[in-house]
Image (spheres, helix red, strand yellow):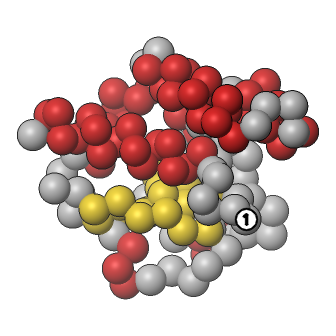
Amino acid sequence: MTTIHIKRIYDPVGDADGFRVLVDRLWPRGVRKISADIDLWAKDITPSTELREDLHSGHDPWPVFEKEYRAELRHNPAMSAFVDAIRNKNTVTLLTATKDLRHTHATVIRDVLKRKLTQAA
């Protein structure tokens, strides 16, 4: 079973990170691509611009964002390819620039991935 962690892209690279995936649509400010040490940039599975902006503006509270983002992921054709890309990895670390790691799209991605990987096992 794949272990999935969430970490800020600004945190140091760790030996336990495994396969490092940036899950932000925009490249994080102040991070040099060479020093980010990512294995994959999965910008195609990130929230739509509209959904992201609604969350950041305070228009949509977290529960509404989470529900709508899960719906986006269900209909996102890139999600299947992403699941296939990590299926055989022991450890995956989802990287984001978000400061609040409890209320980030990365938690939704992690939950969806866990469900999809469990169903496939």
Please tell me whether mark 1 sits on a helix, a strand or a loop: loop
Residue depicted at 27% across the width and 35% down the height: 116
Q: Residue at x 67, y 74 (%)?
A: 10
The quadrant holding residue 112 is top left
- At 35% from the left and 79% from the top, the residue drawn is 16
- In percent of width and height, residue 13 lies at 51, 80
Quarter of the image with the N terminus is bottom left
User: How many marks do you count on the picture?
Assistant: 1
Query: Which residue is located at x 70 percent, y 69 percent?
Result: 32
* Residue lying at the far right of the rendered structure: 57
The residue tagged 1 is: 99
- Residue 16: in sight, yes or no? yes
Name the image quarter holding the C terminus: top left
Residue 63 x/y as whole percent: 64, 36
Mark yes or no: residue 76 visible: no
**Foreground of the two, 93 or 71:** 71
- Horizontal side of residue 109 vs 87, given as left or right: right
- Closer to us: 120 or 85: 120
